[in-house]
Image (spheres, rainbow, N blue to C red):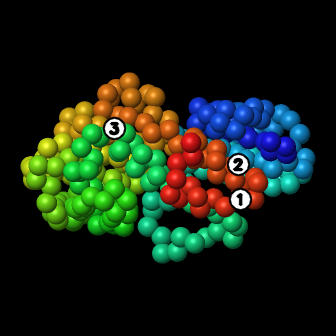
Amino acid sequence: MPNIKIFSGSSHPDLSQKIADRLGLELGKVVTKKFSNQETCVEIGESVRGEDVYIVQSGCGEINDNLMELLIMINACKIASASRVTAVIPCFPYARQDKKDKSFFDIPVDNLYAEPAVLKWIKENILEWKNCIIVSPDAGGAKRVTSIADRLNVDFALIHKERKKANEVDRMVLVGDVTDRVAILVDDMADTCGTICHAADKLISAGATRVYAILTHGIFSGPAISRINNACFEAVVVTNTIPQEEKMKHCSKIQVIDISMILAEAIRRTHNGESVSYLFSHVPL
């Protein structure tokens, strides 16, 4: 492809490399380091004049440092006369905190969805998926699970939870019948995993035969890994928007869906001025 450059921030070089390989490109040369006062320094090691630049940086790990690094990289490319700079952010940082108004962009934004990749994983890995039930661990995810259940033509259920305070669940009420079925919990992210592990127990006690969890972003902080190891999951499936290699060493239940082809195809389509909406319902081959 002419006039396109892909640079990787330091948050998830493995995913950046997969995206570049998929597009048949080399990752651009960039050096990131810290000054002795801990300020981030970024040096772009090649010319980006007139180029269409994509910077891959996920909101994980040292989130504040990585976000600052992304902003400095964008600025460096702008100063060096790149014709366009696009940030590719697999896991968008600071998206969890309750905001009254989330529409704070004055530039074009494409929100990509893991749903097509999730549907593909379910059909390929769960033999009795036609008799499964898709479950939302909270009322907020109802729209997400109904969409997946409709696409699979199966039933859905949801767990209504009453919270005492953030990150602490008080009481859970299951709405729907999971008796003698494979239950698949679907959520956008799991951090300390208290909610999904409680939900799994609830589903088993309500008669589900097996429980899977499928999550877009596996943050897995604090006691998450020990909770998953002690919970009754067949598998906890996450995408690789966040690196999972270290976590997988300590938890055999974690499985990963690679979404590099979705991001690569989004980059290709954006570069060529094509519609990205195809990716909302299809996984690129």
The image shows residue 246, relative to residue 168, as above or below, that is above
Using the numbered discs, state the Cα–Cα distance from disc 3 to disc 1 in whole angstroms.
Answer: 32 Å
Q: Residue furthest top?
A: 249
Residue matched to label 1: 274
For badge 3, the amino acid type reads Asn
Residue at 59 percent across and 61 percent down: it is 277
N-terminal of the pair, mark 1 or mark 2, is 2
Residue at 40 percent across and 54 percent down: it is 188
For badge 2, the amino acid type reads Arg
| Residue 166, x across and y down, in percent | 32, 59
Crowdedness near tag 2: few (<14), some (14–19) or many (≥20) residues, C-alpha within 10 Å = some
Under tag 2, what secondary structure?
A: helix
N-terminal of the pair, mark 3 or mark 2, is 3
- The circle drawn on residue 44 is none
The image shows residue 145, relative to residue 87, as above or below, that is below
Q: Is residue 211 left or right of residue 3?
A: left
Residue 66 in which image quadrant: top right
Name the quarter where the C terminus is drawn: top right
| Residue 104, x across and y down, in percent | 61, 70
Under tag 3, what secondary structure?
A: helix
- The circle drawn on residue 125 is 3
Marks 1 and 2 close (CB-CB < 8 Å): yes
Crowdedness near tag 1: few (<14), some (14–19) or many (≥20) residues, C-alpha within 10 Å = few
| Residue 7, x across and y down, in percent | 73, 40
Residue at 15 percent across and 55 percent down: it is 178
Using the numbered discs, state the Cα–Cα distance from disc 1 to disc 2 in whole angstroms.
Answer: 8 Å
Closest to the observer, 124 or 226: 124
Residue matched to label 2: 268
For badge 1, the amino acid type reads Glu
Under tag 1, what secondary structure?
A: loop
Residue 124 in which image quadrant: top left
